[in-house]
Image (tube, rainbow, N blue to C red):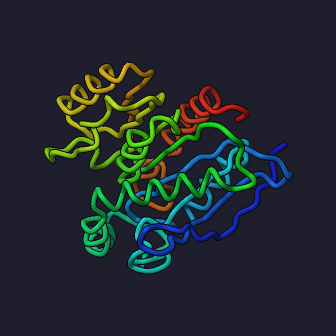
Amino acid sequence: MPIETVLKAVRIPTADGHADALAAFPDRGERHPGVLLYPDAFGVRPELEKKARELAGHGYYVLVPNLYYRHGPAPVIDLPAHISDEARPAVFAQVMPLVETHTTERVLSDADAYLTFLTAQPEVADGPVGVIGYCLGAALAMRTATAHPDRVTAVAGFHPGFLVTDAPDSPHRLIPELAAEVHLGLAEGDLTPEAISELNKALDAAGVGYTTEIYPDSAHGFTMSDTDAFSPAALQRHWDRLLPLLGRTLSGG
């Protein structure tokens, strides 16, 4: 029997104000492991609500923050109901200025606020949390996990973007600070073979359990059913990797 879930709007205190967010959790009066879910670059929308509710239905409290709250409540940009390949350039023209203002300093400040809020909720069990992300959110998940190795025991990223860059503070350069088990589900072409090798070397140096996997016949964005990149088979593979990871690493999941 599927678990009935609650979806509610919340406001997270941050150093720069309040971030609007969604919280999804089982509706049965118990405490559950916490999961911070970072959206893709398109932000919080019905597709992310659906993912949060589905994950919550497996016994987790899932927090989905509006990454762009400094620019206003979600939705910050005008999104079509379905993001076709033809629509992507116009959507990215709106998104990229927001992404570019989301500096590493802001990411880390927000991550601290999100984790503080998440672990303080009465529906969230004591103990470590998981952090997952899609596209841009995968890089944010990795930054969060490396900055908080004492709190994060699972990190997962799917069709990641901005994870391996030439920047001095590229997320992959801090991976040796990790204490979390990692799964990275890549679309074909997400990362070059050289970047994957560099990523794996960093994960080896961290000494953590990890898998980096290229999902067959997948395009960037494969988990998102409101885009042309969507692949039902790859989405199912994502659940098949994510749920056991969280089950192994978060008590009570």
Q: Residue at the spot x=48%, y=67% of the render?
A: 14
Mark count: 0
Q: Position of residue 168 (x, y in %)?
A: 15, 45
Q: Residue at the spot x=49%, y=62% of the render?
A: 226
Q: Quadrant of the C terminus?
A: top right
Q: Position of residue 182 (x, y in %)?
A: 45, 30
Q: Is residue 20 above or below residue 225?
A: below
Q: Residue at the spot x=48%, y=39% of the render?
A: 234
Question: Is residue 89 among the parts visible in the rendering?
Answer: no
Residue 57 vs residue 29, the one in the foreground: 29
Quarter of the image where one finds residue 192: top left
Q: Is residue 238 above or below residue 16?
A: above
Residue 45 vs residue 89, the one in the foreground: 45
Q: Position of residue 86 (x, y in %)?
A: 31, 68
**Left or right: 159, with 103 as reference point:** right
Q: Position of residue 141 (x, y in %)?
A: 42, 46
Q: Quadrant of the N terminus?
A: top right
Q: Is residue 44 above or below residue 171?
A: below
**Left or right: 66, with 147 as reference point:** right
Q: Residue at the spot x=47%, y=68% of the render?
A: 82
Residue 215 vs residue 22, the one in the foreground: 22
**Left or right: 226, with 240 as reference point:** left
Quarter of the image where one finds residue 136: bottom left
Quarter of the image where one finds residue 207: top left
